[in-house]
Amino acid sequence: MLQINKIYNTDCKEGMKLLSDNLISSIVTDPPYGLSKEPDIVKVLTNWLNNEEYIHNSKGFMNKDWDLFVPNPSIWKEAYRVLKPGGYLLCFAGTRTYDLMCISLRLAGFEIRDQIDWIFGCYSDDTECLTKNGFKRYNQINNNDEILQWNFKTNELTWHNPDKIFVYNYNGEMTTFKNRHTDQLLTPNHRVYAKIRKHSRNEIPKEYEIIEASDMKKHWQKDFSVAGILNEGKHIDYPYLIGWWLTDAWTHNDGKACMFSQSKYSTLDKLQKHFNDIDVKYSEYINKYSNEKHKDEHVFYVTGKYADYLLNNFPNRDITWDMLSWDYESRFQLLEGLLDGDGSRDESRGYSEVFWSLKPERLDIFQAICCSLNIRSHIDYNKGCVYLNREHNSTQLQSMHYTENKQYKGKVWCLETQTGAFVVRRNGKVFISGNSGFPKSMDISKQIDKKFGVKREETGEFKTRHGGGIKSDKIQQLKPEIKQTPITTPSTNEAKQFNGYGTNLKPAHEPIIVARKPLSEKTVAKNVVKYGTGEININDCRVEYIENDDPRIGKNYQHNAKAGLEIGNNKDNSSGKKQQLHNNQGRFPANIIMDEEAGKILDSQSGIRPSGKANGNAEVGIATNGQGVPPLRRGKLISRDDTGGASRFFKQCNYDDSDYEVINFMYCAKASKKERGEGNNHPCVKPLSLIKYLVTLVTPPNGICLDPFEGSGTTFIACQELGFDHIGFEMNKEYCDIAEKRLNNNKGI
């Protein structure tokens, strides 16, 4: 008999032979998927039906020998033997080899009872989103705010009212990207947009890729976008003059004139030229300095319509957030005026410019304007300035910029946008990122034309991309360089035949087989009494109502943790007293587990709809029969009044009491690096939150859970935290050592 609560470094088939019959209460495991070359199915079934093992002569997933093929029935037969009658087995499987895994389990004697689908999405809470009213944190955004979203294909920025804001609790490791121009703290599964150069011998990439934050390698060159082009907005008169007025100017004591001053010769010439170009009426005075270190100051006394315009429209000389609503030309000229008034330029390095102010909000607005003009910038609040660089609209991270990931406990959030990305800022550094968008499949038609060496025909239409910032400081040169990629059509007959074909669907789920060892008793109840197995833990796995104002409850109901859901002020309730509708157990668990990204997709397709009517088997609020049981007679049908998207019926774990619609699904899209542990190089680590849910679902009280393919110990850690006994087998010594280290670290938490 083997010792309980231990992982054994041995082949699971041999290890299970040392366990007695009917010992194990549940099995939760992530076995090899066999995602290699397509097997000879006839040979597989022939071998299995003859009680022979099938050996697959190919390389396994990621060249791992242990993943050559799905486990043979002989392995599952040992699992079947040690499992108690009625005991459940939860087994992960690949979408391409799910059928073989089921057949192997069936041949071992298991019943296939069901399938659970694990459907695969943020920013730290100090990350701010750019709105028309300024940079705001998630809890400051209201329904009327418009956020600045970004299209990674065109580099275009547009304003958009977010439909939803997603907020949930997170406790784990966050991925960091940090250099002089960006400071990002993201959940590991957060999708970022970057131009990635994986090796110096590779060509410099021109297109943005969408990749999860934790998949970024240290040695890759990564270009992150920090600016784009905002083309929309209203035209404003005299924006360059306004820029000067808001900086190096003041109101004359008579209240009728505007005063401008300048001592730098280069900007003095620009100011005088602008006055002359638009026919400004002014008087000029020169204050001479005896100190050679100081240049003579030129002061302009401006009157007339221009003075009236400035005094009436900008009496306080404030830079305001509504300037982001100006059109591109107006914002660009405003920027030039602000820089000439309170800025500095390095003449030897034409791209290095700085805007100065002691007021943080002026710096914030100036930075946002830079972002909208495709200009990279970052703020130094200590020095009171914004640094900008017109040569680039992105920032590059190399291996020297690598920073260690951080442990984080608190709120994380994201917005729903039309384009999948939007402008955010952290610690004064603007960047563009998002959590939606999916990897592209290969365009078969293009590959066929490429194979034949044929140039594709251009349609005359273009995909537009804006280039980098404007290099010239001339006010007249307003528009950025525009890069246009022609849209093509197939040239060869073969390519035309397969136009619109690809190679991949979006990977969006992983099946979990729900199998059970047949009951030994005539009923489940008798089997449970004898072995403690045969049931699944419904109540502890319900989709729970967590907060009193949980929107899933419905607008006419009140929630009380002890009393459940109550309804008041109902037309059928003449007394006006609140009546209990049902208890607080939550929704019955479904065979789908999803994260918030999958939930958004589901809700966008289902729309917001109310639930159906209650079955009305018993009237609400009626007297009982004295034994606490209401009479079994049909009462009046009472609507649940439960409104929302279809995602509310599936597994969730956190709910935030924000004023906005929040959908928080079981957050288990990817195992964090903290869960992996130091040195954990196992390629198939499952999220701890997911495994804990599965163990809870099928393991009875005081039960022993078995994992024949323990890997790096996630199932053992889940059992350890839940208080269940566990036995695990793992044939790879390296993974056993990693599991042991993870378990020891977990004990200290």
Image (cartoon, rainbow, N blue to C red):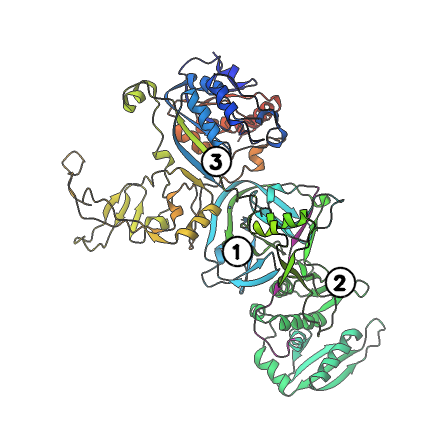
Label 3: which secondary element: helix
Percent across and percent down for residue 172 are 54, 39
- Determine crowd level at label 1: few under 14, some 14-19, many 20+ residues with C-alpha closer than 10 A: some
- Contact, CB < 8 Å: mark 1 with mark 3? no
Between discs 1 and 2, the one toward the N terminus: 1
Mark 1 residue type = Arg
Q: Distance between the residues labelled 1 and 2?
A: 31 Å
- Residue interval drawn in magenta: 218-239
Which is closer to the viewer, label 1 or label 3? 3
- Please tell me whether the stretch drawn in magenta is mainly helix, strand or loop: loop
Write down the residue under mark 2.
351
Write down the residue under mark 1.
137
- Determine crowd level at label 3: few under 14, some 14-19, many 20+ residues with C-alpha closer than 10 A: some
In this view, the residue in front, 328 or 65, is: 65
Percent across and percent down for residue 675 are 55, 34
Q: Does the magenta stretch include residue 234?
A: yes
In this view, the residue in front, 257 or 188, is: 188
Up/down of 282 relative to 576, above or below? below
Q: Which residue is drawn at 75% across and 63% down?
A: 351
- Determine crowd level at label 2: few under 14, some 14-19, many 20+ residues with C-alpha closer than 10 A: some
Relative to residue 384, is residue 32 drawn left or right?
left
- Contact, CB < 8 Å: mark 3 with mark 2? no
Percent across and percent down for residue 283 are 72, 87
In this view, the residue in front, 387 or 437, is: 437
> Looking at the rendered structure, which numbered label has been put on residue 689?
3
Between discs 3 and 2, the one toward the N terminus: 2
In this view, the residue in front, 226 or 197, is: 197
Mark 3 residue type = Ser
- Contact, CB < 8 Å: mark 1 with mark 2? no
